Amino acid sequence: ENSGKMSKLNYLDDTDYYNTSAVQPSAQAEKPRVLLMGLKRSGKSSIQKVVFHKMSPNETLFLEMTSKIVKDDISHSSFVQFQIWDFPGQLDFFDPTFDAEYIFGGCSALVFVIDAQDDYVEALTKLHMTITSAYRVNPNISFEIFIHKVDGLSDDHKIETTRDIHQRVTEELVHAGLEEVHVSFYLTSIYDHTIFESFSKVVQKLIRQLPTLENLLNILNSNSGFEKSFLFDVVSKIYIATDSAPVDVQSYELCSDMIDVVIDVSCIYGASDEVLSTADTKASSIIRLNNGLVLCLKEVTKYLALVCILRQEQFAKQGIVEYNFHCFRKAIQEIFDARKPASSARH
């Protein structure tokens, strides 16, 4: 798999189950850290493999249960750089070797996965213990709850399950005196686009330049007549930024599927003999839909692509679109250049 070249997977020995010194990064210590937690068989490892390693959802059925902490270094692009720590479901916060200060102290986001098809009472108890322990150490953590495996539920069951989990979590936090803790809830499944969209929103909270990127996309839309635009990380298909207009699920799915089409065609007809996970240099693609809309993909950097939705009449002004995109790409490059000195200074 090409994606294997872009992320580094480190497994801990059984003797290092809680020994966090074994996972302390050196040069990458400044990268944001995302913790994946939940009960065993809730789908944590499957999420990680599908989103960041291009594993087919059906292949995840054969994954072994996580028995130790797994650290995954995600380094797809200048913006998408963080670490994912996948924790085993049998994690014991009261174990004397569990170093809460180190694990939660350097954490930016905590994703807790709940199996919606199972009895989630035990999961909610574990969630409350997790939030309490983590917030005590680091009040700045973003708590993200994935109500997972909802593909097997009816729409009514999804609504009822979400309402019940939201109410129970809120009541537990209020009872514990943690009303100020903000928790986000997402309905997810590895068999559709929901897991990519949800992880997109988690990753966006790790990007300090997000307001700048959103502003650039708003300016690009207004000057080019785009109805919607996404800045995608091509490897994982998560969008690191979009304009300020509300995200329509169908529009996101169209743009995400377009990336798959471009990558597949590029792998077959690309200029290089090596099969790349991304499009060729300065790749672009146009897809005209039968409803009068046009999908337009433009490569921004090696691992970032801009995917826009516009109407056919706006696409007729292709010269303006090309010029505005050139300015947008230049602005993105300037943000990259500004990040590099800051990263060097930290190391």
Image (tube, rainbow, N blue to C red):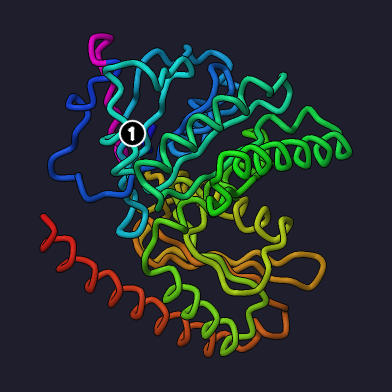
Amino acid of disc 1:
Asp
Q: Please provide percent x and percent y for residue 106.
A: 29, 44
Q: Is residue 297 visible?
A: no
In magenta, the rendered stretch is: 4-16
Q: Nearer the viewer, residue 152 or 260?
A: 152
- Percent across and percent down for residue 286 are 60, 67
Which image quarter holds the C terminus? bottom left
Whether residue 104 is visible, yes or no, is yes
Q: To which quarter of the image does residue 285 belong?
A: bottom right
Q: Which residue is mark 1?
A: 72
- At a point 11% along the width and 63% down the height, the residue shown is 345
Where in the figure is residue 242, as x and y percent of width and height?
55, 68
**Nearer to us in this view, 5 or 175:** 175
Q: Residue at x 22, y 29 (%)?
A: 23
Residue 215 in the image: x percent, y percent? 49, 80
Question: What is the secondary structure assignment of the residue under circle 1?
Answer: strand
Q: Nearer the viewer, residue 304 or 45?
A: 45
